[in-house]
Structure formats: structure tokens, C-alpha cells
Image (spheres, rainbow, N blue to C red):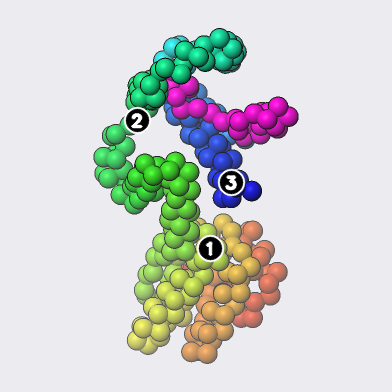
């Protein structure tokens, strides 16, 4: 009851931390991981741990870094570490009381420092600056609370992803007719952007031009897009203009034919 949002954040942090560690060391050592297998193993371990009131089980940045630097290559390293932890709890806890927390922190910091890649900031600035936003948000908020940094990073990444889906690239070519070519699949956040682009360009021409919608890059659409296309057909028809579809992929064509749109026309290619 006292945990509140922590009930959702703790498993999310555990999952993200485990996958991040696994991917980092997989990249360093040239092997691949299966995120589904990692999730299954973590879930199974936490289910078993719940019967003995264990802490939430996740991957550990510090211990993983220490294992990597120590040359550990098999799960047997976990057995050795576990045995040492049990022996320490049984016989050394009274001695650990006198170790300053700063000394313990230094051990962790020295283990994880090699994992910090400062060059990623320069690389992202050169390659794609927008990707610096979730990185900086996560990095800075982790100084406040780790869970806030992780949640904020996920939210910012989700917003950027939704924005790219809502604003797909649209190529418009003018000639006898207006050729509109979306650069990716269409989903519900993008339909208003497509409608605004088509209507503004078609009606701005003198005289207004009919439109060919080149769908060669559209591999999937949803119901909201179908409704939006029906409204677009109706709006253009009021202005005496037509909207013709071409280069439709089979899954998209099947959806549009099933919707039985009024005035729907399609051709194999825009030349026809």
C-alpha cells in the first residue's frame, strides 16, 4: 500500500535494467540475446523468490561488470557469488558495519565506470540530434531518482515515436494531376496529417487538381485511417475533385475493398 507507483515502476525498472545490461555485454562480446528469454527467466525467478520473501530479482550493473572484468563466462559464477554472499551474511556482517558507505560506493563506481560511453553524446549529435532528447532526460533525472529517469526516458521515447508515426513523410509531385506518395504505413495518428496535406495542396492549385494516392510504401492501415479516407473522398467530391489509389499492396487493398468506400477507384500503377 505504501509503494504506490512503485508497484508498476519496480518491475519496469527490473526489465529495462536486465535487458540493457544483457544488450550492453552482448555487444561487447559479439553474441545475441533473446529478450523474451530474459523476461521469462526474470519472471520465473521472481515467482520462485516470492515464496521465500526475496527482494525483486533483476540484472545488476555492478555485479555484471565485476563478473565481466573477472572473466566469468558461465552461470557457475552466480553459484560462487551466491555462496560468498551467504558466507558473508553468516560470519562477516559484524565486520561490514565498520566499512564506510563511501568505500562501498567506490567499489561499485570503479566496476561500472568502464560501461559509461561518453562518446555516445558526440555520436548522436552527429548522426541524429533528436535522439539526444530521451538520452539527456534519462541521464539527468537519474541523478534525482533512478525510477524517475527510466520512466521519463520511456515516456519521451514514446512521444517521439508517436510523433514520427503521426507525421509520416509525404512526397507531393505536381503535374496534370497531384501525385501524393506517403513514405510509410498509415495509422490513426497520421490520417489528419494526410488529409490536411492532400486538401491544402489540391485546393491551392489553380485550377484545383484531382489526386492520385501512391500507396506503394503503405503496408498496413487501421480502421480510423479507412474512416478518414472515406471523409477525404467525400470532401474532395464536394469540390468536384477525385481521389484515385494506385500501387496498393494486397493487405491494404483487401481492407479498403471490405470497407466498400463510396467512389473508391484503384489501379495497379499511377501511369494507368
Q: Position of residue 134 (x, y in %)?
A: 39, 48
- Residue nearest the observer in this picture, 156 or 60: 60
Q: If you read the primary sequence from the N terminus, does the residue marked by circle 1 or circle 3 appear first?
A: 3
Q: Which residue is mark 2?
A: 116
Q: Are marks 3 and 2 in contact (CB under 8 Å)?
A: no
Q: Is residue 229 magenta?
A: no
Q: Which residue is mark 1?
A: 186
Q: Are marks 1 and 3 in contact (CB under 8 Å)?
A: no
Please report the bounds of the magenta region as a residue range: 38-66
| Structural distance between the alpha carbons of marks 1 and 2 | 38 Å
259 lies above or below 129: below
Does the image show residue 53?
yes
Mark 2 lies on a secondary structure that is loop
Q: Residue 7, which numbered label?
A: none
Residue at 63% from the left image edge and 68% from the top image edge: 223
Q: Which residue is mark 3?
A: 3
| Structural distance between the alpha carbons of marks 3 and 2 | 30 Å
Q: Are marks 1 and 2 in contact (CB under 8 Å)?
A: no
Residue at 48% from the left image edge and 89% from the top image edge: 239
217 lies above or below 205: above
Residue at 68% from the left image edge and 75% from the top image edge: 260
Q: Main secondary structure of the magenta part?
A: helix
Q: Please tell me whether mark 3 or mark 2 is closer to you in this view.
A: 3
Amino acid at each position: 500500500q505504501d509503494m504506490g507507483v512503485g508497484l508498476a515502476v519496480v518491475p519496469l525498472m527490473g526489465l529495462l535494467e536486465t535487458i540493457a545490461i544483457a544488450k550492453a555485454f552482448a555487444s561487447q562480446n559479439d553474441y545475441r540475446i533473446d529478450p523474451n528469454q530474459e523476461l521469462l527467466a526474470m519472471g520465473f525467478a521472481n515467482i520462485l523468490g516470492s515464496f521465500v520473501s526475496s527482494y525483486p530479482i533483476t540484472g545488476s550493473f555492478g555485479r555484471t561488470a565485476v563478473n565481466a572484468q573477472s572473466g566469468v563466462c558461465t552461470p557457475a559464477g552466480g553459484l560462487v557469488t551466491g555462496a560468498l554472499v551467504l558466507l558473508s551474511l553468516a560470519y562477516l556482517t559484524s565486520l561490514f558495519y565498520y566499512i564506510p558507505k563511501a568505500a562501498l560506493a567506490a567499489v561499485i563506481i570503479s566496476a561500472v565506470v568502464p560501461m559509461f560511453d561518453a562518446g555516445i553524446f558526440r555520436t548522436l549529435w552527429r548522426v541524429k540530434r533528436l535522439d539526444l532528447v530521451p538520452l539527456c532526460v534519462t541521464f539527468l533525472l537519474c541523478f534525482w531518482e533512478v525510477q524517475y529517469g527510466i520512466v521519463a526516458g520511456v515516456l519521451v521515447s514514446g512521444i517521439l515515436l508517436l510523433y514520427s508515426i503521426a507525421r509520416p513523410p509525404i512526397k507531393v509531385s505536381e503535374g496534370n494531376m497531384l501525385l501524393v506518395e506517403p513514405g510509410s504505413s498509415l495509422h490513426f495518428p497520421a490520417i489528419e496529417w494526410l488529409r490536411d496535406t492532400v486538401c491544402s495542396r489540391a485546393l491551392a492549385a489553380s485550377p484545383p487538381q484531382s489526386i492520385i494516392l501512391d500507396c506503394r510504401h503503405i503496408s498496413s492501415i487501421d480502421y480510423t485511417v479507412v474512416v478518414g479516407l472515406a471523409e477525404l473522398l467525400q470532401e474532395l467530391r464536394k469540390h468536384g475533385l477525385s481521389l484515385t489509389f494506385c500501387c496498393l499492396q494486397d493487405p491494404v487493398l483487401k481492407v479498403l475493398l471490405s470497407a466498400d468506400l463510396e467512389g473508391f477507384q484503384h489501379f495497379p500503377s499511377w501511369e494507368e
